[in-house]
Image (tube, rainbow, N blue to C red):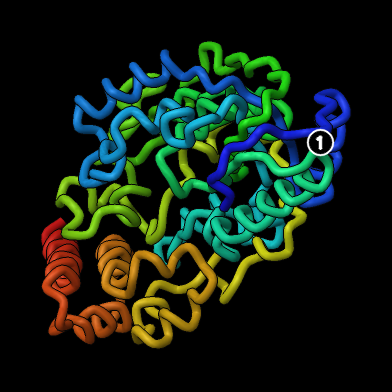
Amino acid sequence: MNTGISPATKLDPSALMADLRRWSAELGFSRLGIGRIDLSSDEAHFLDWLRAGFNGDMAYMARHGLKRSRPAELLPGTVSCICVRMDYWPQDAADAQATLADPGVGYVSRYALGRDYHKLMRARLQQLCDRIVTAVGPFGYRVFTDSAPVLEKALARNAGLGWIGKHTNLIDRDAGSYFFLGEIYLDIELPSDSAGTAHCGTCSACMPACPTGAIVAPYRLDARRCISYLTIELAGAIPLEFRRAIGNRIYGCDDCQLVCPWNKFARPTVEKDFAVRHGLDHSQLIELFSWSEAQFLQRTEGSAIRRIGHERWLRNIAVALGNAPTSPALLESLHSRANHPSAVVREHVQWALEQHSLKAVDQAHP
């Protein structure tokens, strides 16, 4: 990271813009744009979201004050923002809808099936900065990939990479929404692209598709109800009211994107590092629940999944097992973790066993 802000030299904005688009394509980014850093309207929306408590236990969302919505306060001297996106949908993955429909297997959000995007994207963004330095001389910058207080979707919209949909994800009419975002704050003033315009229209398919009703209004997401939050961000017990609705989703959720009509234009990734690892696109819950902590760490090495840790992994799978069809093998699997050292795991295993006891009662007394 270069945190010293100094005037760039030898700068021809139009030539640099042409070079940036060419370099970004060579580095595997599917699109690049330059966005305005004025986020005043988004700041008001974000502060209202925080006041509503929709961030749940994600205290870090409020930790940096207004720096999240004011790039020049996060990195003094910032006057422009380069935004990029990279497609992630793995073309070799098992069909998402078919996996969701099979309660005996675990569903992992498709962005997490391959290598963790954070390091890959950050390294590519740094390479892009290195090329800029070679072209125009030293300049002040900082790269981001979902790793700092940045309103990345608002910046990407300003850069013309799409619009923020009713489910609060960024959508592009030519590429859907299955992509990662990255940013470079810089002290070089570059001409901004035209901001993306909204094309959701009257469509609201994403809202009823959310299993837990997390999209409480258009463009308004209550993270406390979101399955991605519940299975990834939340450290403790998953609230009882959401456990059945989680179904077999053990890491994240794609439902609001799967029903979005714009994703018929989504492009499979060409990035080999995003290919499916260890069969996690369609693995049996019982098998995943049997992983020791050492196996979990080995099989999630280099994956975004590793950051939730083995305890949350077992917690999530216990809920999915509670929602799966009863079988002797499944009950044996749950009982094998009934005395787990973690109180969180034990509590979710007990809940899962109770679900199967209730099913047995219902079947005995139809």
Q: Quadrant of residue 236?
A: bottom left
Badge count? 1
Tell me: residue 96, above or below residue 342.
Answer: above
Instruction: Return the residue at label 1.
Output: 21
Asked if residue 347 shows in the view, the reply is: yes
| Quadrant holding the C terminus | bottom left
Q: Which residue is found at the position 66% from the left and 52% from the top?
A: 126
Is residue 360 in sight in this rendering?
no
Locate residue 2 relative to residue 29 in the image: left or right.
Answer: left
139 or 250: nearer the eye? 139
Q: Residue at x 60, y 54 (%)?
A: 122
Q: Is residue 35 above or below residue 283?
A: above
Where is residue 48 drawn, in percent x and y?
A: 27, 20
Q: Amino acid at mark 1?
A: Arg
Q: Residue at x 86, y 37 (%)?
A: 19
Image location of residue 177, percent across then percent down: 60, 36
- Residue 181 lies, in percent from the top left, at 59, 41
Badge 1: few (under 14), some or many (20 or more) residues near its Cα, within 10 Å? some
Provide residue 254's location: percent of width, then percent of height. 48, 45
Front in this rendered view, residue 182 or 362: 182
Looking at the rendering, which quadrant does residue 348 occupy? bottom left
Q: Nearer the viewer, residue 50 or 139?
A: 139
Q: Is residue 42 above or below residue 24?
A: above
In-front residue for pair 68/305: 68
Residue at left 39%, top 87%?
294
Q: Which secondary structure lies at badge 1?
A: helix
